[in-house]
Image (cartoon, helix red, strand yellow):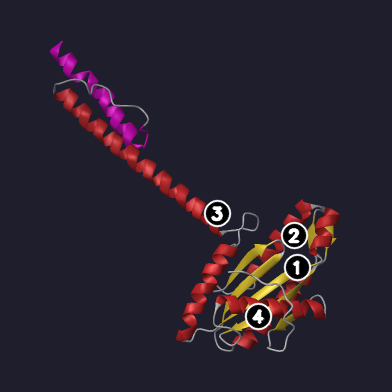
Amino acid sequence: MLMKRLFKPVPRLTRALTHIAHNQTEHATPYTQRSDEIGCMAQAIEALRKKVAEREHLLEVKEQALRYQHLAHHDALTKLPNRVQFNDALQEAVMQVPDGTPFNVMIFDLDRFKTLNDSLGHAAGDALLVEASQRVQGLLEESDLVARLGGDEFSIIQHANRDALSEANQLARRLVEVLQEPFAIDGHEVRIGVSVGIALAPRDGTSSHTLLRSGDVALYTATEMARGRYAVFSPGMNMGAKHHDT
């Protein structure tokens, strides 16, 4: 009977350890109330179970926090960075300008998007936004960033390698070309376009506020010229454009 009392619990304690090894920590360890060697072993296993359970909880909390952080900085529809992340990236880029790191800011709207959204419905509009964002991403270098600011409005931070103006013109031309190509949306061939405003840093501003203002003015000018156009900011442009807050 003594041997039975001593060794019968061993298989259950072994199973408890196996469960802990597989991160199965929902069940308390048996025999922890005993005052003999089996009780000491059970208490040690129970302490281990609680530590593993706590670690798993902390990992879950960390993963959840990372998910929330991602949601806070990304657009739910297109998965692009949102306005918050764009503003952070723009502030960081501005801080690097004194070190001789020029960059370009592009603000662009999708032409005829509202008409499409009204005629084919919001689901079609959402599908168009997703596909358009994917096309734009395919044009960018790894160091560049495109963000959805809201609605059909997007912005790009393009880091310049050699000639900022030439590189801005090249990317803007490609934006116009790829977004003029037809989209297949819900069985419909859809054609839109894009209007792009460009500001060069530090030439057109040394703060995020000024650069966004310059980009807005250039976008307004491009829209006034015609659809499917881009414009680079210059001081003589019409200042009646809308304004973005950082």
Residue that numbered label 1 is attached to: 110
Closer to us: mark 4 or mark 1?
Answer: 4
Q: Residue furthest right?
A: 119
The residue that appears at 60% across and 62% down in the rendered structure is 80
Check disc 2: other Cα within 10 Å, few if <14, some if 14-19, many if 20+: many
- What is the magenta range? 1-25
Under mark 4, the amino acid is: Ser
Badge number at residue 71: 3
Query: Where, quadrant-wise, is the N terminus in this rendering?
Result: top left
Numbered disc 2: secondary structure? helix
Numbered disc 4: secondary structure? helix
Under mark 1, the amino acid is: Leu
Q: CA distance from mark 3 to mark 4?
A: 29 Å
Quick check: is 17 in the magenta stretch? yes
Residue that numbered label 4 is attached to: 214
Left or right: residue 115 compared with residue 56: right
The residue that appears at 75% across and 68% down in the rendered structure is 110
Q: Earlier in the sequence, mark 2 or mark 1?
A: 1
